[in-house]
Image (cartoon, helix red, strand yellow):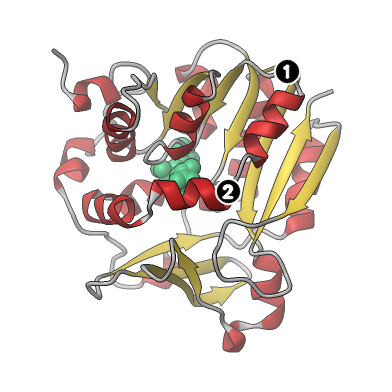
Amino acid sequence: AKSVDDLARSEGTGPIDGTADLVAREEQVFGDNPLEVRESDHYTHEYVGGFVDKWDELIDWKKRYESEGSFFIDQLKARGVRSVLDVATGTGFHSVRLLEEGFEAVSADGSPQMLAKAFSNGLTYGGHILRVVHADWRWLNRDVHGEYDAIICLGNSFTHLFSERDRRKALAEFYAMLKHDGVLIIDQRNYDSILDTGFSSKHTYYYAGDDVSAEPDYIDDGLARFKYTFPDKSEFYLNMYPLRKNYMRRLMREVGFQRIDTYGDFQETYKESEPDFFIHVAEKN
Ligand code: SAM
């Protein structure tokens, strides 16, 4: 039988240079000056073994399921969607949910460690065999084949792209892989409120009750560095680009999406008056 790693690499780009090294390494690497790390390629150094495992131990899928409700499933069903490409599979939460609901799903991600975890989670949660593909969004059409009724990019993933060129390229790749009447669903953290209220009034976000907290560690117009603290006091970081809501809407419109509805959201357990997340539902036609 194939190992999980083999399966995670059985389609798509396969191991990129240095991947074997990354798989073995448990620690995040940000170098001497973490605030200078503003690159779209860096995500593979951030989602490493220790972080991936800890994240998934603590983000209780049942609680996440309850807090998210059926928003995404309802959006997809209302449009008669059957086939879905999950481009930011991560540890597989949404891919598994889609399979449970009877959608045909393909699960892509640029991190082999995430795909390996997603594959084993699929087996654990319901005995699903995930169709995993190792692919970076910027070259999606090279590695994933077919056309889909819907593409989902959830869990504040698009924020990992640091240049406008990369964002446009990724959106163009998503657009090209949708059927003529397809829909793209992308969510993002509400960075407008973080940027506008300033670093001083930083707010701590709690995931799955009080287990994991996420707080901005550094913010400027080009970088949102978040610190994740776990109950055993271990800390991990993610460097992200602080996408403004209307900028994101404009990019999708310019790439060709005809109608974009943006919803304010739920998901976090801690809330102030403003939503923590925005969800964009973009229709191709
Ligand atoms: N959707 C999942 C969830 O909500 O739990 C995972 C979200 S995780 C925050 C972001 C995911 O996006 C990671 O698994 C990462 O590897 C992936 N990712 C980031 N940039 C990418 C890129 N350029 N191409 C493909 N995957 C990428």
Q: Are marks 1 and 2 in contact (CB under 8 Å)?
A: no
Please report the residue visible at 25 percent of the width from the left and 34 percent of the height from the top. Answer: 17
Residue lying furthest bottom in this view?
200
Which corner quadrant of the image does residue 266 belong to? bottom right
- Tell me: residue 212, above or below residue 248: below
Q: Residue flagged by tag 2: what amino acid is it?
A: Glu
Q: Is residue 146 visible?
A: yes
- Please name the residue shown 27% across and 32% down the image: 124
The label number, if any, that marks residue 68 in the structure image = 2
- Residue type highlighted by circle 1: Gly
- Seen at 54% across and 24% down, the residue is 101
Disc 2 crowd, CA 10 A, few/some/many (<14, 14-19, 20+): some
Taking 236 as reference, is 88 left or right? right
- Does 51 sit above or below residue 226? above
Pinpoint residue 280: horizontal percent, then vertical percent: 72, 44
Name which quarter of the figure residue 227 lies in.
Answer: bottom left
In the picture, which quadrant includes the N terminus? top left
Q: Is mark 1 within 8 Å of ligand 1?
A: no
Where is mark 1, residue-wise? 80
Which sits earlier in the primary sequence, circle 1 or circle 2? Answer: 2
Badge count:
2
